[in-house]
Amino acid sequence: MSERVYQQLKWSLIAGEFAPDAGLSIRKVAETFGTSAMPVREALKRLASERALVSKANRSFRVPKLNPKRVSELFFLRAHLEGLATELAVPNLSETKIRRLEKLAAQTDRDITAADKHGYLTNNYSFHFTIYNRAGNDELVSIIEGLWVQSGPYLADVVNVLETSEEWRNLHIWVAEAVRAGDPQRARELIERDIGWGTKVYRQLARGSP
């Protein structure tokens, strides 16, 4: 039961359902997931140990406050590790997976046009992990997912900034084209550029912080 709650909470963080500094009540989470307090408490403690949440002395849990420097570092790590996973994955992607990537690339662009943030974040995750899950390295994928859990609330915040960039909107399409062409280096470069937007935005915020 606690594993199921843990996975549900992980997804909520990845999908940006909890904003930075949001509090997570054990009682409310248990009510939402239709379970008791114990598996919720265990899942929250596990996420706190993974730095996705912070725990307080009164046993409450919160999403970490926005720290632009730390967030820029998360996106920096993501860019390089996800670039590596992409390079490893390209030779292993089947025609079926490539067609799925192409459909997801088009869908994420439509999500932005429709201002459907939830749809974008869901399809964005599917796009990226369709690639990474074919890297042939489970440890690498696990580390990447852990970084997604930590950065999810901040990615949700930054999507509105990034949608003004035409280049950023095209990156998924270009990645799919590079995969279709069997060009792992090009695909890696584009994935790093895609994630690098988060690094750039939060680094700029960090420089402007007091």
Image (cartoon, rainbow, N blue to C red):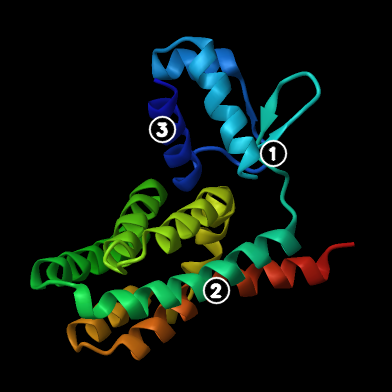
Badge 3 is on which residue? 8
- Which percent across, then down, holds residue 132? 34, 65
Q: Is residue 208 above or below residue 155?
A: below
The amino acid sitting under disc 1 is: Asp
Q: Could you classify mark 1 by the number of other residues whose Cα lies within 10 Å: few (under 14), some (14-19), or many (20 or more)?
A: some
Q: Which mark is residue 114?
A: none
In the image, is 180 to the left or to the right of 120? left
Q: CA distance from mark 3 to mark 2?
A: 27 Å
Q: CA distance from mark 1 to mark 2?
A: 23 Å
Badge 1 marks a residue whose secondary structure is loop
Badge 2 marks a residue whose secondary structure is helix
In the image, is 91 to the left or to the right of 13? left
- Seen at 27% across and 62% down, the residue is 130
Q: Could you classify mark 3 by the number of other residues whose Cα lies within 10 Å: few (under 14), some (14-19), or many (20 or more)?
A: some
Q: Most extreme residue toward the right, as rendered?
A: 210
Residue nearer the viewer, 47 or 102: 47
Badge 2 is on which residue? 197
In the image, is 153 to the left or to the right of 92? right
Q: Could you classify mark 2 by the number of other residues whose Cα lies within 10 Å: few (under 14), some (14-19), or many (20 or more)?
A: many
Q: Which mark is residue 21?
A: 1
- Seen at 39% across and 72% down, the residue is 85
**Can you tell which quarter of the image residue 158 is in?**
bottom right
The amino acid sitting under disc 3 is: Gln
**Can you tell which quarter of the image residue 34 is in?**
top left
First of labels 1, 3 by sequence position: 3
- Seen at 22% across and 68% down, the residue is 101
Q: Is residue 199 above or below residue 178?
A: above
Please indicate, yes or no, whether residue 170 appears anywhere in the rendered image.
no
